[in-house]
Image: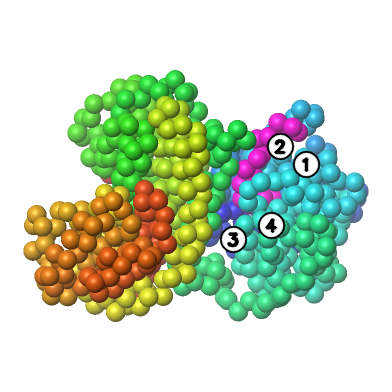
Amino acid sequence: MCGIVGYVGEQPALDVVLEGLRRLEYRGYDSAGVAVLDPSGGGALTVVRRAGKLANLEAALAGRDISGTLGIGHTRWATHGAPTDRNAHPHVDCTGAIAIVHNGTIENFAELREGLEMRGHELTSDTDTEAVAHLIEERYAGDLPAAVRSVCAELDGSFVLVVTHREQPDLVVGARRNLPLVVGIGDGENFLASDVTAFIAHTREARALDQDQVVELRRSGVRVTDLDGAEVEGETFHVDWDTAAAEKAGYDYFMLKEIQEQPAAVSETIGGRIGADGRLRLDELSISDEDVRGFEKVFIVACGSSYHSGLVGKYAIERWCRLSVEVEMGSEFRYRDPVLDRHTLVIAVSQSGETADTLEAVRHARQQRAWVMAITNTVGSSIARESDAVFYTRGGPEIAVASTKAVMTQLSAVYLVGLYLAQVRGTRDSDEVRSHFHDLATIPALITEVLSRMDGTRKLARDLSGEERVLFLGRHIGYPMALEGALKLKELAYVSAEGMPAGEIKHGPIALIDKGTPVVVLATRHALQPKLVTNIQEIRARGARTIVVATDGDESVTPYADHLIRLPDTKSLLSPMLTLVPLQVFAAEFAMARGLDVDQPRNLAKSVTVE
Ligand code: AGP
């Protein structure tokens, strides 16, 4: 997620904004920039932006005399357009009088950009943000808040915008939809930021903007309106957090915060993928329809949790595309000398885009002339750069070593890629593709519902935190999540945890079952669910303590569940996106009950860049 800072007051704006951006560095970014308005001398609006870390920006600012007490700043986590100087924020309009920074995704920016260019605007970056600056330019007639409100009404998607105009030396305007923007209320000075971390060194009085609200920030005070311009009241709150807590939004660990960010991360990832014609659009893939129709085989290559996302992708792609899919661990792929050619699609799934095992698999696949598509969360990463096509998940930076929202967005991505391939190959008609997409679009709200039900799961995890062995069972699409649940518990609580196909338990692993052995069974609604009930009976008869994840209203499992974790219903093929949540919460709570640091588990790195 990008970092945003706005300031108007009496202090040197450049100092305040840079300090705020430093406090937002934890959010992760790959470029940064500032705009400062100096009302003296004709109102110069100075914009400086650089790819890379803040040090690059500070080097560019060194020695320059940039005074002024109004400014905005941005740290960018690239989603549209590579992390370059040209794509860094702030962006300006044709006249250079308007500077804007933005967090989020403008889903209809392609249409907006086309219209602007047809009306003579020259846009120089690859970003969706720049189009907004030029739209405000068109609407501005001296009233900046009115221009911003008018433009926001035309935007689809999620956004936080912070805007300045050279003619407005006492005004910074902000607006938000779906992403957070908070106001810091000072004495003769006021602040805007993505989160309070940026300004709590100056003030702890804050107000969070609500959906589709526009804020006018002046030295004398703050005015908030809706998109119609009607003033709206709002609550201010006092920020008690210290800086460390503020970076985690009050959670004890980044992982807990990132689990909660999953609904927004999925919305960001799937947003804007349906075009005006109702067809699925993955424009960034840049693979011709002819090549897509020429694919005869798919490999999905990944490691760890990303491998589990790939296993889910196998079910979706085989179901929708009738293409044979093999899923292989990055560390094994090239050593088995797989049969690859121009009719093979290799999908490399990697949050970091830097995992050495997966990167070497990509290189091997390209040497064998296979098509390579990356699914990654990191723009400009090695795997992205070395692939033929890239699907960027938009989960925002993931700080915790144990992957949560990245896996969730990878699941979104493999479903979208499967639907896209099916659409192009004609194995699913456009109505079916749209229907499946709309099922996917319901998932963020369902994840939110699941997150609201996790108190029982947390208590269960604490009660079981003395256990040294936990098994996870699932069938069909549930099996990859059984593996993921086991991996989460292994890497967070250092417990011997094993995930396996439920049907496999009687072929040996059932010998592991002793009296009270905890076994998590993923038994949400599915055609094979009755067989899972049999498996639950088998293990319970041997003393297992059964923790059953089941769909609301399904009473078939109730007699055999020592603990029930209920989930809302969804299409069975999408159920991993819901079963994943209690598995994450369970593992994190289990580890915390053991007094372990869930953000930095022992022996682990966030990105494994060695083979
Ligand atoms: C996930 O919780 C682990 N931290 C790890 O298995 C991770 O998924 C794996 O190393 C792959 O990383 P990548 O997605 O960045 O390639």
User: Circles 4 and 2: CB distance less than 8 Å?
Assistant: no
Q: What's the amino acid at mark 1? A: Leu
Q: Which residue is mark 2?
A: 112
Residue where numbered disc 4 is placed: 176
Q: In the rendered image, which quarter contains the C terminus?
A: top left
Residue 39 is left or right of residue 28, and the answer is right
Local crowd at mark 4 within 10 Å, few (<14), some, or many (≥20)?
many
Instruction: Give yes or no for contact between labels 2 and 1 (Cβ–Cβ under 8 Å).
Output: yes
Give the side of residue 134 with respect to residue 105, left or right: right
Q: CA distance from mark 3 to mark 2?
A: 30 Å
Specify the amino acid type for callout 3: Leu
Which stretch appears magenta? 101-116
Is 56 located above or below residue 429 in the figure? Answer: below
Residue 135 numbered mark, or none: 1
Residue type marked 4: Arg
Q: CA distance from mark 1 to mark 4?
A: 16 Å
Rendered residue at 71%/75% (across/down): 236
- Choose the circle earlier in sequence order: 1 or 3: 3
Q: Residue at x 52, y 67 (%)?
A: 248
Residue 147 placed where, x, y %? Answer: 83, 49
| Mark 3, secondary structure of its residue | loop
